[in-house]
Amino acid sequence: MSDVDNHLPLTPGVFQILLALSDGEKHGYAIMRIVKEATDGQMILGPGTLYGAVKRLMRDNLIAESDYRPDPAVDDARRRYYELTDLGRRVLMAEAQRLADLVAQARRKELLRAEGAGYGGEA
Amino acid sequence: MRLAEHLYRVLLRLYPTAHRREYGKAMLIHARDLERDSQQNGSWGIACVCANLVKDGLVNACREHWEGSIMANSSIKPAPWLSVLLAALPGLLILLTRRFPLQQLSLDLIFWYVYLGVLVVAAPIIWWLKKRFPVWALLPAGALVWSLVYSAGMELSAWANQNRAGGVQVPGGIAALSFLLICVICAVVLRKYRFPRSVWVLGAILVVGNVALALLYSLDLFGETGLLGGLIQYFSISGLGPLEGLMLVAIGALFAREHGVLAILIVIGGYSYMFADSDYLFGYPQLDWAWLSTYFAAITILYLVVVPITLLRAKTRLGRILAVFLPLLAFHVLRLGVPLLVIHEPVQIRPGDLIATINILLSFVLAWVVYSVIADEKQEVQASRDFTAHQVVN
């Protein structure tokens, strides 16, 4: 089993956190807002949940603390920024592929509508 | 300060110290931002955020404690079976001696004293040769230290009272002073450790609780011996129980750097006198109770045989917690409850039995917390050294 496989499957929360970091470093609250938007407000990460996950992701070397520091005039200097590691990106890609495969299976079983079809339309 | 930030600052106190130090500031900023963004929804929005923060704080504080403290060290190396058997030997010896009638107690305990005698010679030699106190000797060492200090203190108290015929009688007063002296000596040795607030709170509960509960005994003392004599006796009575526990915890702490929470075997050994003293064990005139020996054997096995074996063979911190505290709770339920159920005469639990139970339970919890702090600090220092060595090498 590879390094990547050891981390799969990811929980929905961890997947969303890694996804939020996939396009650049962010601080905790920014991650929370992106996850909230991406899930239509279904997933709101409180500080305990978020930083507990951050701790475990850093321990597993999936994310790392970034050296990036914003201008103190526009952001709180006490914020901590995080970024994906190489391993984290590979795990995220593997998980996305795993989910895509599952979706493809569901589609083959005609449990899902084809891409592009509306909720009321036919495949 | 904003409400949510203030609320979360309180909730952060529930988290493990290491987690709070690492992420506390960022979590507070997060809570503050949540509240700021919810203000557009008015008071209802802020109330919802606060409710979610409370839920988030409570659930995740428990999770961090569980993962960070209890489930940590999931690969604890169990002690070798030879050490385990040697550690359980005192309990087995007591069981062996108890096949005789209880009236012959003092003669039967010869096996126990032979074991302690061997220990006095063997353990220091092994300690000197291996530079490590043998883990199997912790339990009998606790018994030996406690019985020596207590016996010496009681003898001195009796001698002092003899020379003060008609004056203030101080039962166990010098024993209490001896316990206190050893506590102070150990505290000086251990002063470099920074113990968390919970340690001081537990210690304070132990002392203040006894001072308060001793009033149950002492109200009539003042009428008999006057104010000064009554006060001396009152503090002697209230001090003896907690100080014996604190002394055992303090002595065990000296071994916690080497053995971590296994040093709790010192406390178990110290309290094992309860097995050798039928008055302490029951507090009732029940020596002629037909099932006494069976009852005694059951709790000896539970406490002096099962605990050392399971504690030394446990592979996780959770396993170690269960190994100590489940038998401990079962022991006290048995000790207090069984006589009430099976003795066919009116009996009641005396306040002294309850106070002793509370003292013992609190002493064990205190010991566990203190030894965990010392062991964790040692691990941190070791990790820091490893990191420095790694940096130097690279």
Image (cartoon, coloured by chain):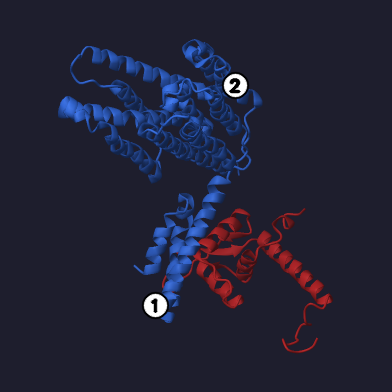
Chain colours: A red, B blue
Q: Residue furthest bottom?
A: A121
Q: Earlier in the sequence, mark 2 or mark 1?
A: 1
Can you say whether B139 is above or below B37 in the image? Answer: above
Can you say whether A43 is above or below B288 in the image? Answer: below
Q: Which residue is mark 2?
A: B86
Label 2 and label 1: CA atoms lie apart by 65 Å
Q: Quadrant of the C terminus of chain B?
A: top right
Mark 2 secondary-structure assignment: helix
Among the 4 quarters of the image, the one containing residue B321: top right
Same chain under badges 2 and 1? The reply is yes
Instruction: Please state which of residues B7 and B1 is positioned toward the viewer in this rendering.
Output: B7
Residue B281 visible to an observer of this rendering: yes
Chain at tag 2? B
| Image marks 2 and 1: residues in contact by CB distance under 8 Å | no
Among the 4 quarters of the image, the one containing residue B198: top left
Tell me the residue at 46%/20% (across/down).
Answer: B287
Q: Position of residue B294 (x, y in %)?
A: 56, 24
Q: Quadrant of the N terminus of chain B?
A: bottom left
Q: Name which residue type carries label 1.
A: Ser
Mark 1 secondary-structure assignment: helix
Q: Which residue is mark 1?
A: B43
Tell me the residue at 57%/41% (across/down).
Answer: B317
Residue A76 visible to an observer of this rendering: no
Instruction: Please state which of residues B63 and A2 is positioned toward the viewer in this rendering.
Output: B63
Instruction: Please state which of residues B119 and A55 is positioned toward the viewer in this rendering.
Output: B119
Q: Name which residue type carries label 2.
A: Leu
Q: Residue furthest right?
A: A108
Q: Position of residue A53 (x, y in %)?
A: 57, 60
Instruction: Please state which of residues A108 and B32 is positioned toward the viewer in this rendering.
Output: A108
Along the horizontal axis of the image, is B365 left or right of B222? right
Chain at tag 1? B
Q: Position of residue B82 (x, y in %)?
A: 64, 23
